Image: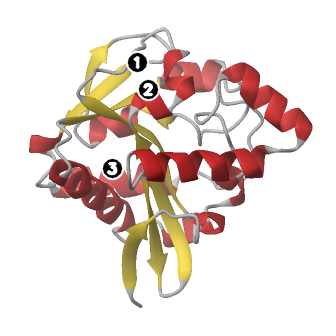
Amino acid sequence: MSRRVVNLTLDNLNDLPRRCRRCVFWELDPVAGEAALEAGDVDLEKEAWLSATLLDWGSCGKLAYVDTVPAGYLTYAPPVHVPRSLAFPTSPVSGDAVLLITAGILPEFAGGGLGRMLVQTAAKDLTRRGVRAIEAFGLAAAAASAEPGVPVAGTTGCLLPAEFLLAVGFKTVRPHHRYPRLRLDLRTAVSWRADVEVALERLLGSMSPEPAFRPV
């Protein structure tokens, strides 16, 4: 089986899992996101966001394929392109960092190294573009179990588990009992130990691609 990672573009946007394809949690502020959902415009809003981000900033996501089958994804962008990034108690993202938005591997492809490929490819891309760090809003384990509907409305796809981020080298820069903000210095992301790779595959592979997200 052949494996490859390509940039997310308008041409392959529909290869995202349905939940992520129809989710505008990050791309719109909470009020606009709810309005888009009620109007049934989430698909168009997602496409418009990707188009604008590509034109203004460039590549903002990666798709992994096994042969011709979409198997995993990862998205990221400067916080200015991510309205939801201002809505957290640990906001704002640092001025020198890009925000890791979301990531996942379809369960049937977990354990094959795709998560490592995705993160390494993204890190190399951002390093070449002069980005110093990646930050992310994590979902603390206690919050995920105690309040599964906040703010991801019953899914774990819109916020990455804080334990995953810590396992792959992120460090906490703004602690919070629910939504800590974590940071990865890209200079430390060039090499990956075996234990990091295992954690990456296990946690990314556990992110179910369904059901569709409904913003709070």
Q: Which disc is residue 137 wearing? A: 2
- Mark 2 near mark 1, Cβ–Cβ under 8 Å? yes
Q: Earlier in the sequence, mark 2 or mark 1?
A: 2
Mark 2 packing: few (<14 Cα in 10 Å), some, or many (20+)? many
Q: Residue furthest right?
A: 39
Amino acid type at circle 2 is: Phe
| Residue pictured at 48% horizontal, 87% vertical | 67
Residue tagged by mark 3?
Answer: 199
Q: Would residue 216 be seen by someone viewing this image from the given angle?
A: no
Mark 1 packing: few (<14 Cα in 10 Å), some, or many (20+)? many
Q: Which disc is residue 15 wearing? A: none
Label 1 to label 3: alpha-carbon separation: 19 Å
The foreground one among 91 and 104 is 91
Residue tagged by mark 1?
Answer: 180
Label 2 to label 3: alpha-carbon separation: 18 Å
Count of marks, rendered view? 3
Q: Earlier in the sequence, mark 1 or mark 3?
A: 1
Left or right: 2 in relation to 121: right
Q: Residue furthest bottom?
A: 1
| Residue pictured at 58% horizontal, 26% vertical | 144
Amino acid type at circle 3 is: Ala
Q: Residue furthest front?
A: 55
Classify mark 3: helix, strand or loop.
Answer: helix
